[in-house]
C-alpha cells in the first residue's frame, strides 16, 4: 500500500519544514504549500489523503480555504486538520464550524499530530488508499490497486485505473474532455484533449466482455458519462 499523502498549507517556512520533516520520517508522503492558490493547485495535481491548514495565511485565511473545500463537491470529503496558534474556545469552535475535522493548537508534538492524522483518517475510512468502489459487478480496490468483475481480475494501465476510479466516484455526471484532463491528469499537465479519447478506448477494451464497458457512455458534443445500472 502506498504512503498516505499529506498536504501542509502553512506560510511560515520553518514551521512547515518542521512538520514535513517529522511526517516524512514517519513514512508519510508530504506536499507543501505556503499560500491558498498553491494548495489548490497541489490538490488538483496530486490529491492528498488529508490536509493540514494554518489559520493565518497571506491573501486568504485558513477558515476561508476550508469552507471552500467543504462546499466544493470534488473536495467536500477531503479530511482537514486546522493547526494554529489560536487556542481560545471561540477560535476552536470557529475552526470546527468552518468544516475542519480536527483542531490542534501550537505548540504541538509530532506524536500528537500524527495521532490526530491517524484518528481523522480512521473516521474517514482510512484515507483514499483503502477506498473500495463498486458499480454493478465492477469493483475497484484502491488499496490493492485491483479491478475485478466477479472472479475475474482485469489488467488496467495506471492512467486507465485513475480514469476508472474517477468515473466510479462520480457517476451519472457528464465530464468534458478538458475537465477529465484536469481531474485525472492534473491541472498543470498539458496534453491534447484527444488523449482522453485514447484512454477511454483503452479502458473500454480492458472492460470488454464483462458488459461493464457499456457503463462508459459518450455524450455527443459534451464528453463522457459513467452510468452503471441502478
Image (spheres, rainbow, N blue to C red):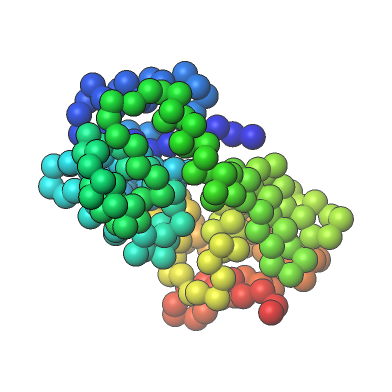
Tell which of 164 and 141 is nearer to you.
141
On screen, residue 123 above or below 22: below
Q: Position of residue 145 (x, y in %)?
A: 67, 44
**Which percent across, then down, holds residue 76?**
41, 59
Q: Is residue 156 visible?
A: no
Above or below, 129 relative to 178: above
Q: Position of residue 171 (x, y in %)?
A: 56, 71
Left or right of 25, for residue 229 = right
Q: Is residue 86 visible?
A: yes
For residue 202, above or below residue 59: below
Identity of the residue drawn at 36% across and 63% down: 72
Which residue is found at the position 47% from the left and 18% from the top?
25
Q: Nearer the viewer, residue 29 or 117?
A: 117
At horizontal 77% and vertical 71% (from top left) the residue drawn is 211
Number of disc labels: 0
Question: Residue 53 placed where, x, y %?
Answer: 30, 41
**Is the residue 7 above or below the residue 199 in the image?**
above
Location of the N terminus by quadrant is: top right
Extreme residue toward the left, this view: 59
- Give residue 176's quadrant in the image: bottom left
The residue lying furthest to the right in this view is 151
In which quadrant of the rendered view does residue 178 lie? Answer: bottom left
Q: Is residue 91 left or right of residue 129?
A: left
Q: Residue at x 65, y 58 (%)?
A: 133
Amino acid at each position: 500500500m502506498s504512503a498516505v499523502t499529506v498536504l501542509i498549507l502553512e506560510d511560515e517556512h520553518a514551521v512547515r519544514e518542521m512538520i514535513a520533516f517529522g511526517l516524512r520520517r514517519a513514512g508519510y508522503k508530504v506536499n507543501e504549500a505556503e499560500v491558498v492558490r498553491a494548495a489548490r493547485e497541489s490538490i488538483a495535481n496530486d490529491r492528498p489523503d488529508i490536509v493540514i491548514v494554518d489559520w493565518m495565511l497571506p491573501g486568504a485565511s485558513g477558515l476561508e480555504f476550508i469552507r471552500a473545500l467543504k462546499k466544493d463537491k470534488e473536495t467536500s470529503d477531503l479530511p482537514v486538520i486546522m493547526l494554529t496558534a489560536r487556542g481560545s474556545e471561540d477560535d476552536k469552535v470557529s475552526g470546527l464550524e468552518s468544516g475542519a475535522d480536527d483542531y490542534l493548537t501550537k505548540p504541538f508534538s509530532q506524536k500528537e499530530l500524527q495521532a490526530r492524522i491517524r484518528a481523522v483518517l480512521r473516521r474517514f475510512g482510512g484515507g483514499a488508499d483503502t477506498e473500495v468502489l463498486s458499480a454493478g459487478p465492477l469493483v475497484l480496490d484502491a488499496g490493492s490497486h485491483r479491478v475485478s468483475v466477479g472472479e475475474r481480475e482485469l489488467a488496467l494501465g495506471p492512467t486507465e485505473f485513475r480514469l476508472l476510479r474517477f468515473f466510479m466516484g462520480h457517476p451519472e455526471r457528464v465530464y468534458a474532455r478538458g475537465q477529465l484532463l484536469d481531474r485525472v491528469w492534473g491541472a498543470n499537465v498539458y496534453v491534447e484533449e484527444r488523449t482522453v479519447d485514447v484512454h477511454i478506448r483503452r479502458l473500454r477494451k480492458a472492460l470488454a466482455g464483462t458488459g461493464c464497458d457499456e457503463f462508459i457512455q459518450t455524450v455527443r458534443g459534451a464528453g463522457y458519462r459513467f452510468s452503471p445500472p441502478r
